[in-house]
Image (cartoon, rainbow, N blue to C red):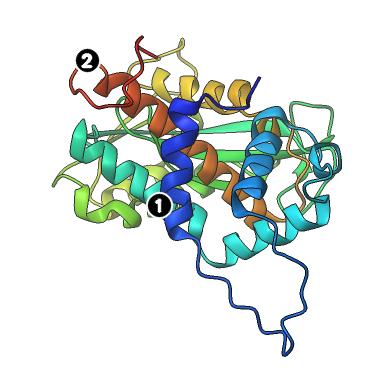
């Protein structure tokens, strides 16, 4: 069974391929071994993300684990993963429309058994190594950005860099936005920050019973990350830039999946699935 259905993989690869810079062979005699197809490497990377397997287990006669890592780093340096995520968001906004009036931010703790630049002692896992994702979503739960930090970092200090992810889609934002936060952000510092940024806010009060409100969508998106992408649920990557790239790729897949599902009842196209995804 493929890691992703063809209805998602085909448009994902089509757009990803267009962002890959042209490779220039600099060998004076042109004696390099034939370059392995980008499509093969891309499919292996999707398998790593979805299945959570190591590069060594995914590698086979078509390409080695070293080749996957090297090509992955080339794509990260070219900014392809971030650009791909931005294109997916803009496409969704054009065809369906992003709900940017209400934004939700929340943190999620996951295991990081290999340690690394974004790993720290997890307060919910007996001090074992863990990573925190501070996730920003729009009103329907589509991810707009994510900041990775050590598991022992508080949510509140990560709010500013998380909201700064909106700079990528600043041209799409309405004049006023409302940020929904849980009781972990209930502080004067958080309110001062939101007032500084010109945002309205709804913050749950500490010490009172659970006040879900509009925040449930971010919990669902965290579940999409952890249940749909095993590499994010148990983070074995060491470098922060690699984690950010994999999160951007996962976000792109989530946006494409929702775009196809919502467009199914609104548009018609030649490769439209026979059943609603």
Mark 1 residue crowding within 10 angstroms, few (<14) / some (14–19) / many (20+): some
Which residue is label 1 attached to?
165
Question: Position of 263 compared to 192: left or right?
Answer: left
Residue depicted at x 53% and y 37%: 250
Q: Can residue 189 be seen at all in this image of the molecule?
A: no
Q: Where is residue 272 in the image (x, y as percent from the top left)?
A: 31, 22
Q: Are marks 1 and 2 in contact (CB under 8 Å)?
A: no
Question: Position of 14 compared to 67: left or right?
Answer: left
In the image, residue 191 above or below residue 220: below
| Labelled disc at residue 265 | 2
Question: Position of 86 compared to 171: left or right?
Answer: right
State which quarter of the image contains the N terminus. Answer: top right
Mark 2 residue crowding within 10 angstroms, few (<14) / some (14–19) / many (20+): few
Q: In the picture, residue 114 is in which quadrant?
A: top right
Q: Position of residue 20 (x, y in %)?
A: 50, 61
Tell me the element at label 2.
loop
Q: Where is residue 90 in the image (x, y as percent from the top left)?
A: 28, 45
In the image, residue 80 above or below residue 12: below
Residue closer to the observer: 69 or 41: 41
């Amino acid at each position: 069974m493929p890691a992703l259905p063809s209805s998602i993989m085909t448009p994902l690869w089509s757009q990803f391929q267009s962002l890959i810079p042209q490779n220039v062979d600099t060998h004076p005699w042109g004696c390099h071994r034939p370059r392995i197809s980008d499509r093969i490497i891309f499919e292996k990377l999707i398998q790593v993300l979805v299945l959570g397997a190591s590069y060594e287990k995914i590698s086979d006669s078509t390409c080695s684990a070293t080749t996957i890592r090297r090509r992955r780093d080339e794509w990260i340096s070219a900014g392809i993963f971030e650009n791909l995520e931005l294109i997916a968001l803009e496409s969704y906004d054009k065809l369906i429309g992003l709900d940017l009036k209400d934004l939700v931010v929340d943190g999620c703790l996951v295991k990081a058994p290999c340690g690394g630049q974004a790993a720290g002692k997890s307060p919910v896992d007996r001090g074992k190594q863990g990573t925190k994702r501070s996730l920003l979503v729009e009103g329907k739960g589509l991810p707009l950005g994510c900041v990775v930090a050590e598991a022992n970092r508080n949510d509140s200090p990560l709010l500013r860099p998380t909201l700064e992810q909106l700079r990528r889609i600043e041209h799409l934002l309405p004049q006023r936005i409302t940020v929904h936060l849980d009781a972990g952000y209930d502080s004067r510092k958080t309110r001062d920050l939101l007032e500084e940024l010109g945002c309205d806010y709804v913050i749950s009060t500490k010490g009172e019973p659970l006040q879900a409100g509009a925040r449930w969508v971010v919990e669902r998106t965290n579940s999409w990350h952890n249940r749909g992408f095993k590499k994010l649920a148990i983070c074995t990557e060491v470098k922060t830039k690699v984690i950010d790239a994999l999160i951007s790729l996962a976000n792109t897949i989530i946006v494409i999946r929702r775009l196809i599902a919502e467009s199914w009842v609104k548009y018609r196209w030649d490769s439209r699935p026979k059943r609603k995804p």
